[in-house]
Image: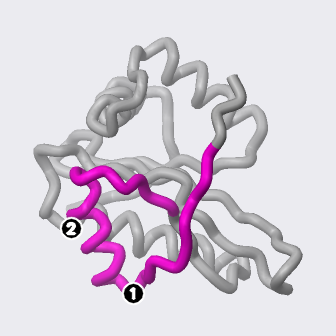
């Protein structure tokens, strides 16, 4: 069974391991510091999926108001499933949770961005299977 709950400090080691799976800096202190900033600013909502008694996945969500639409857009800022647990429905459960979260907050659309690395192709297939379509390109410029 998969349960999804807001992030708690007890999840830190599992969350750090998930960040390492994605290739991001994942030292416990750095992840704890980032999560502290997120919680202090309340701009991002982090939820953790648990399965078989361990951290199995993570999703970070935000609500964005736009100039183009009356309703906000819900955004998946980050989603990851533990590599050893992929293919067990955890990603789909996290996405279903995200869509419900967005609907509860009046979102008209759900959006996510994903890197174009070869290792992300499986995730891209899942997003398309869930009804998401690729409708743009993301440009990024590093400021620091």
Q: Nearer the viewer, mark 1 or mark 2?
A: 1
Residue 95 falls within the magenta-colored stretch: no
The image shows residue 30 at horizontal and vertical percentages of 51, 17
Q: Is residue 144 above or below residue 76?
A: above
**Part of the protein shown in magenta:** 113-140
Instruction: Report which residue position mark 2 lands on.
Output: 89
Q: Residue at x 13, y 63 (%)?
A: 87
- Left or right of residue 123, residue 63 in this image: right
Q: Residue at x 50, y 41 (%)?
A: 7
User: In this rendering, does residue 50 appear at all?
Assistant: no
The image shows residue 52 at horizontal and vertical percentages of 15, 48
State how the image is colored: one colour
Which quadrant of the figure has residue 93? bottom left
Q: Quadrant of the C terminus?
A: top right
* Mark carried by residue 131: 1
Q: Is residue 24 above or below residue 76?
A: above
Question: The residue tagged with tag 2: helix, strand or loop?
Answer: loop
Question: Between marks 1 and 2, how big is the CA–CA gap?
Answer: 16 Å
Q: Residues within 10 Å of mark 2 (few under 14, many from 20)?
A: few
């Amino acid at each position: 069974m998969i349960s999804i709950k807001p992030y708690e400090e007890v999840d830190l080691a599992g969350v750090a391991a998930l960040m390492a799976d994605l290739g991001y800096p994942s030292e416990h202190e750095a992840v704890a510091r980032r999560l502290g900033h997120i919680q202090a600013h309340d701009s991002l909502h982090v939820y953790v999926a648990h399965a078989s008694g361990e951290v199995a996945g993570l999703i970070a969500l935000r609500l964005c108001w736009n100039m183009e639409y009356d309703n906000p857009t819900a955004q998946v800022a980050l989603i990851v499933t533990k590599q050893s647990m992929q293919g067990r429905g955890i990603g789909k459960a996290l996405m279903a949770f995200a869509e419900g979260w967005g609907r509860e907050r009046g979102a008209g659309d759900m959006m996510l961005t994903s890197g174009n690395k070869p290792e992300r192709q499986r995730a891209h297939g899942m997003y398309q299977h869930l009804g998401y379509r690729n409708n743009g390109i993301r440009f990024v410029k590093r400021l620091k």
